[in-house]
Image (cartoon, rainbow, N blue to C red):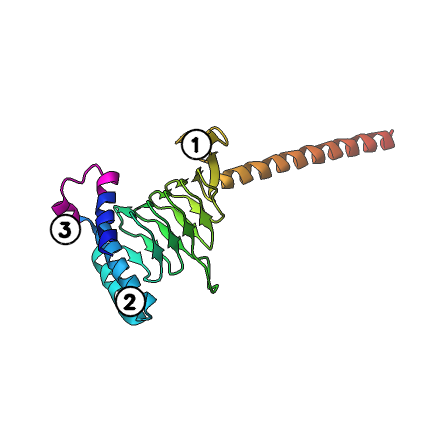
Amino acid sequence: MFSAFKEDIEAVFEQDPAARSYFEVILTYSGLHAIWSHRIAHVFYKRKFYFIARVISQVSRFFTGIEIHPGAKIGKRFFIDHGMGIVIGETCEIGNNVTLYQGVTLGGTGKEKGKRHPTILDNALIAAGAKVLGSITVGENSKIGAGSVVLNDVPSNSTVVGIPGKVVIKDGVKMKDLNHCDLPDPVMDRCNDLQRQIDHLTRDLEMVRQKGEQIDEHSNI
């Protein structure tokens, strides 16, 4: 456990250029406090001291604003940056060298039993406000964009953005042209599709109306 604590500190210095000293990091980084509290709570949880584990978890949540269920499995060198509002569910599994930013939710989608939270593999990064929901897997070296809602598996070496999340880069190749100000908008795409159908139906009705008028004219003659 103490070896894991040391690696957690080293991860802070690697990931955060604002970290200046061990003293500052140990005393002021709430993400680090939340991780350490979880590692202790998880030990009690594995030994079926569930009440003590939950108490430690809730005390940590009160002081850090980060909620990690004691049943979650977290690997080495886990880094939480500006962690306020992060929620990590009971059956969540997180690999090594994973980074989370503020507001991330690794949650479930309902009241299902068993494995109901995500599995995050090594070297993944999940940006601010992203929601990864359900028993899905985020592959190694993948990135989830800020504010994304991910409901399906993410391949390794991929970048996902949007609501719902879509893969826009895989293995370094862009799946489509993407600008930061032009993220995928499935709702707008659907609205545009419906508008095209309406325009098509309108043209068909106009043609039917014109043919009806022509038939009436010939009948009068």
Q: Disc 1, disc 2: CB below 8 Å?
A: no
Mark closest to the chain's N terminus, 1 or 2: 2
Residue underneath mark 1: 182
Residue located farthest toward the front when viewing the structure as drawn:
3
Mark seen at residue 145: none
Q: Nearer the viewer, residue 71 or 167?
A: 71
Q: Judge left or right: residue 104 versus residue 198.
A: left
Q: Position of residue 102 (x, y in %)?
A: 30, 47
Q: Position of residue 72 (x, y in %)?
A: 35, 58
Task: Count all numbered tags in the image, as a single digit.
Answer: 3
Q: Nearer the viewer, residue 197 or 157?
A: 157
Measured Cα–Cα span from mark 1 to mark 2: 47 Å
The magenta stretch spans residue 57? no
Residue underneath mark 3: 27
The magenta region covers 12-28
Q: Is residue 6 visible?
A: yes
Residue underneath mark 2: 44
